Amino acid sequence: MARVDVLMPQMGESIAEGTLSKWLKQVGDEVKRDEPLFEISTDKVDAEIPAPTAGVLAEIKVQQGQTVPVQTLVAVIETEKGATTAAGGGATPTPSAAAQRAPAAPGAGAAPLPAKAAPVSAGPAPTVSDRPGPSLTVPAAGKGDGAESAEERLRRRSTPLVRKIAAEHQVDIAAIPGTGFAGRVTKQDILGYIERGAPAPGVSRPAAAPAGAVEHPAVEPWPGDRVEPWSKIRKITADHMITSRRVSAHVASFFEIDYTRVAQLRAKHKAAYAERGVNLTYLAFIARACAEQLRQHPIVNAAVSGDSTIYRRDINIGIAVALDWGLIVPVIKHADELSLLGLARAINDLGERARTKKLTPDEIQRGTFTITNPGGFGPYAGIPIINQPQVAILGVGTIEKRPKVITAADGSDAIAIRTMGMLTMAYDHRVVDGADADKFLADVKRMLQEFPEGAV
Amino acid sequence: MGPRTVPAVPNPAAPPIPAGLERWQLLELYRYLRLTRTLEERLTALYRQSKVIGGLFRSLGQEGESVASAYALERGRHQDILSPLIRNLGSMLVMGAQPIEILRQYMAKADSPTHGRELNVHFNDLEKGYLGQISHLGDMVPVMAGIALTFKMRGERRVGLVYVGDGATSTGTFHEGLNFAAVQRLPLVVIGEFNGYAYSTPPTKQFAVRDLAEKAKGYGIPAVTVDGNDVLAVYGATKHAVDRARQGKGVHFIEVKTFRRKGHAEHDDQHYVPKEEIERWARTNDPIDRFTATLLDHAWAEPAELTRLDGQVKDEVDQATDACVDEPLPAPDTALPGVFVEPATAERLWFRSL
Amino acid sequence: MAEITFLEALKQGLWEEMERDERVFILGEDVGAYGGAFKVTEGFQQRFGEARVIDTPIAEAAIVGAAAGAAHMGMRPVAEMQFIDFISCAYDMLTNYVATARYRAGLSTPMVVRGPCGGYVRGGPFHSQNPEAAFFHTPGLKIVYPATARDAKGLIKSAIRDEDPVLYLEHKWLYRRIKESLPEGEEILTPIGQARLAREGQDLSIITYGATVWKSLEAADQLAREDGVSVEILDLRSLVPMDDAAIVATVRKTGKVLIVHEDTRTGGLAGEITARINEQAFAWLDGPIMRVTAHDVPIPYAPTLEDFVLPQTDDIVKAARWLAKY
């Protein structure tokens, strides 16, 4: 005994329901195949619905007058035929079901059923390529390191939003444990990290902005004044300047440098450098001297964290660049490992890319010492503000020919024309004492004035 | 019709059969007519049993012209080719389509000729000689013109035949296709079925001519108007046109006047057609009834022969139904192959592998 | 207030505009005496007469072309494509003639072309299409695609009143399945070019339109219940012009975007939306912009095949879940 479902049919594409208007049979009645069983009415048309199979009307599920959605079970017919036939004629196929075929009705004397029609051309059996999520193969861009995978990049740089938050809060993405896709740092991860301010063990604490956001007092504009709301970069700079002065105990030392030797070396080697695509500047020499001397005076290459001093392992020198739209400090990583040529090239390149807005977020992070050089039109000497979370910043005064007293070997004094310039280092007296600063600067001065030709 | 005694063998006194047909062919025509109607009745029942999915389109009242016109073609592999519309099931059966194929198509079975991809009679077998339509009416005319063009290019003595309804003659593609075929003098016969309605639109809203045959003048081709429910008349007219086309005499237009006795599809109750008119056609002008009467009145067949054919047709439809009604629907990812030859399959989208 | 279906709301909108403005008229196949294949215009010919509800021959190019001519002369035609799949027959008229009319010749062409689109109804390749991508890139043609009964009414009214030609896409699966209570006595006009927030959320944005709005709502409920993920859903409603500001706002809010549409992946509108988000909201993205669409195959007839090809609620749930965890 098999049970066959009878459903409310769909008489038209948009029809969603039908009303069972009249039962033509009762429970217990025998029905023949295709014999009218009940009448329905829908928005479009009324119709008689025939029985799908011969048998006995066993159950009525929908009463006269009831309106139900299409495909609702309306009745059940019990039939003598074999296995239960689900409504719709085998709706859910399985691979094995495809092989089954209902046998021909008994007593078939007519010609055998024709062979299957020629199949629609479908090519070879397809291998449907399954992918566990979308393809993330992104060619690794940037610094010539072609071996980085998409997942590594994601862990290192996360997404635009997270990088934006990281830059705003001066947080290093790599320092934060990530819980997102491929272990990347998510928005929740970085916000939580900033909020807690608690680093994972062994990881240095980032310089969080001190409690109390920076508020710049309002001032009333007068008629005719032009009020220009700050750009993002101006706001960041302004807030940073205030914060820096609040955080560090700013003092400054002034040293006068005789650049005559450097000038000579520069003149001598400029063309050779130019041939190699590098503009050899005074700044390169200064950076070289600083890089070497920071290695000798680690307190100047440090950071303050709570009640501790962090002595940075790497020497990453930031070179401040003044652009039309604001200040930016691209960083030369591992500056102490670069030759004069390498430094000069790096300075050229970073400056160029800063001007053309092609710096990556990574290139403005993780500096340990900053040099600011206003250039030819700059002051005799200036007092810069420390670039947090560093402890020192070196300002380069104008370099020009000035008279200087030279003491000859025999002790006699003369006035000579020398290429001179001031170096001003502002430093954080919380951890850098005057003697530390002066020793560092004295060594920088000595190296510049006695710059070894072999190092050019 | 009163009782009659029909001799068991053909009555030598019976009038000669027209149009060059032989007695066995009359019986074959009858069988195709009966098969068309019975198969559609079964499809209707299956539709109301939720086994046929989508829409169901009957050709009730038009079986005569579909069967008779197709019968005039050279049938067999690589012979003549026709393009049927949804109400030309009869023509497809004549060309060799099998009831089980039609049933499988309507029920969206995995083993249907289109593997469940297209509905009702939208399928083809170019070797047997039929090319199913797409829903955009008129579009098959230029396509069949193209097929007829290859016959001409290759010097083959083959003919194409295409059906258009009164509605389809309003379309741009009908015009362009017919004009092209006419000016190229292609071996194409066009059967214009004037059946009274395009969905709900009567001919008075469809065009300004009275007969479709008048349109043919605009294309420079000969046309006739025929009683579409007179099987032998339709056969004769089509045979004449097909023969002339085969001789290189170009396109011929045959208008068959008939009547659509059901709505546009099963879900259309046809309330815009006066009931009396439907009943009148059913009572006095049913093509199968008329053909039956013709066969018996002329003693070209005996009642017992026809009854036996009726029984055979019913058995055939029952068997075909039983054979496939419980077959499975296509497996879901069989939807992907076959968009192109190369690549062989469309890509499965990423979220289906999560 | 009784609930009315999407179809009834559309009908109300058409009726109100026909009452309000005698320049409005309807033309199409079987729209008059029969009331339309889906009964959208049932009763209209009795009320407004044969001159304003015209039964045309089967001739989509002529229907669209004639509507354009009438629109030039100050009428407000509403041309029906019996199934939007047949709009292909009018492609030349609509893109070459109608869309360019104002730009090249200063010709005013305030007309509406409307028709039932969409699948999930086992209609096969020619009764299930979503054609918006074919017209999306044609300058000069507005495209609207309501998902709610209210917008069905509001957008048809706005479309008819708009000075530009508008393609109005009505999803046949929604016709009788969506019901809503609409306030009586209120003039409902949905502004063209404005998206609608179908659901507010915090964690992830779904940008979608048409029938998939409803599938997305189902998915969002499931995600809230099972995963505690809060999904925001933006119903675009208007494809041309598109509401960039609303798109940017939701991206900025959640940082994660899933675009869902019933049209195919390749060339579907999700690509364009992705490009705009990339241009206008890149910095706020916390994950790749993903999309759930139909597979790149014609819509097949068999239920198992159609269900596979088209996007389903379960697909949206899985995709959103994946993206939320990114």
Image (tube, coloured by chain):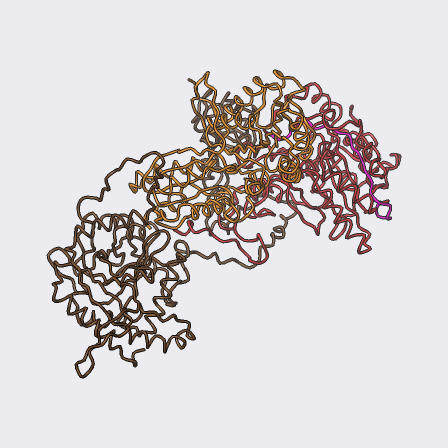
Closer-to-camera residue (B295/C97) = C97
Residue C151 forms part of the magenta stretch: no
Query: Please, what is the dominant secondary structure of the magenta stretch?
Result: loop
Q: Which residues are magenta?
A: B245-266
Does residue B290 appear left or right of residue A204 in this picture? right
Report the front residue among A87 and A59.
A87
> Which image quarter: residue B243?
top right
Tell me if I can see residue A383 in this picture: yes
Chain letter for red, please. Answer: B
Q: Is residue A101 left or right of residue B250?
A: left
- Total tally of numbered discs in the picture: 0
Q: Quadrant of residue C129?
A: top right
Q: Would you place residue C209 above or below residue C14 in this image?
A: below
Left or right: C66 with respect to A341? right
Q: Which chain is brown?
A: A
Q: Position of residue A39 (x, y in %)?
A: 53, 23
What colour denotes chain C?
Answer: orange
Q: Determine if the magenta segment contains residue B257.
A: yes
